[in-house]
Amino acid sequence: MAKFRQGIYKSEMVRRLVRWLDAMPHPPLAIEIAPERISLVRWSRKGSVEGVAVEPLPLSAIAPSAVDANIADLPAVQKALANVCKRLEVREDHDVTLLLPDPVVRVFVQRFEEFPRSRQEALALLRWKLKKSVPFGVQEMLLSYLRQPSPEGGVNVVTAVARLSIVREYEDVARTAKLRPGVVLSSSIAAVALLQEDRPTLIARIAGRALTTSIVRGGMLRGYRCTELPAHGGALTPKMLLEEIFPVVAYYQDTWREEIRSLQVAGLDKRLREFAPHLEKELHCPVTSLLETAVSSGRIPEHARSLAERELEGMLGWMLHRG
């Protein structure tokens, strides 16, 4: 998901995956608003991490949704943001990137035999195609898209959609701290930048009760799904996770006639050791940690290790996006 109002998104680091039409601004600050915490990261002009602050949220403060109001306890969210800003001595009137919970943003991968070159015509076509797939009206739809080549001919289009009123909720939280929200994207789309694989790879990212699964192959996004898990934390079992992952795997195998060759997981922390044998047995591929793989490959510089230690894969991905 990118800066909705301009419908643009471009990442030099993951250009093999996504290439939006125009250059994206690179604010020195990024805020990730998640159900359990608010995180703030500040970068220097040279791109190194200058500071990171994380503040927990009450469990009921945010209820991520693509349809309904998300922020249930506005004072708690505002206080948490004020605290992280104070700890990093953030002054007013800074531009800021907002990373939103994945359920806020709907992502679609569609194939077209022909797709308009005109941006205005493309947006009109996508709104028409998606009007029955999103639970709100076209007039409320914020939309960004990217074109991808299709091995079968035509063009694959990845479209990210969110409801205007919900995006404004999060933007207004930033504005209460006297910050200017510019770039807006979902955490998992940002985290995809951590991936460095040419083979068909599935990313499974758990955040609260949300599971986001993304499939990347040959630099292209070929599948994306965000669902609600039946449980989270210690109550989540390998069987529960597999039942949510299988639909994306089956879709990919049926559509592209090849199997997933790698699974990279985020959000399980130390429980991944418990889950990995079950996942490997059923999916017939190696299972690794998205963060640990990125760190061991040398993609995460020393100055950003603090983000990995706090499991801020969305922030790390955005850092790689911004170059």
Image (tube, rainbow, N blue to C red):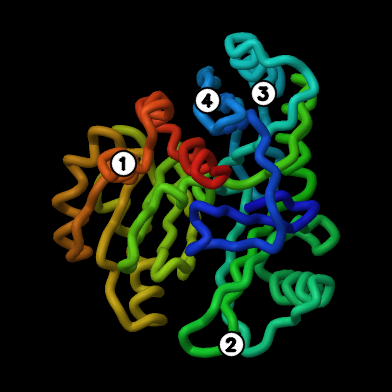
According to the image, label 2 marks what residue? 154
Q: Earlier in the sequence, mark 1 or mark 4?
A: 4
Q: Is residue 83 above or below residue 167?
A: above
Q: Amino acid at mark 4?
A: Arg
Mark 1 or 3, which is nearer the eye?
A: 1
Q: Earlier in the sequence, mark 4 or mark 3?
A: 4
Q: Which disc, if any, is residue 37? A: 4
Percent position (x, y) of residue 127?
76, 70
Percent position (x, y) of residue 208?
45, 37
Q: Residue at x 73, y 43 (%)?
A: 166
Whole-number angstrom distance, CA of label 2 to CA of label 1:
37 Å
Q: In which quadrant of the rendered image does the C terminus lie?
A: top right
Task: Check if mark 1's residue and mark 3's residue have beta carbons within 8 Å.
Answer: no
Number of numbered discs visible in the structure rendering: 4
Kind of element beneath mark 4:
strand
Kind of element beneath mark 2:
loop
Relative to 153, 95 lies left or right = right
Kind of element beneath mark 1:
loop
Whole-number angstrom distance, CA of label 1 to CA of label 4:
27 Å
According to the image, label 1 marks what residue? 298
Q: Residues within 10 Å of mark 2 (few under 14, many from 20)?
A: some
Which of the 4 image quarters holds residue 115? bottom right
Whole-number angstrom distance, CA of label 4 to CA of label 3:
13 Å
Q: Amino acid at mark 2?
A: Gly
Q: Residues within 10 Å of mark 4 (few under 14, many from 20)?
A: some
Relative to 31, 286 lies left or right = left
Q: Earlier in the sequence, mark 4 or mark 2?
A: 4
Q: Residues within 10 Å of mark 3 (few under 14, many from 20)?
A: some
According to the image, label 3 marks what residue? 73
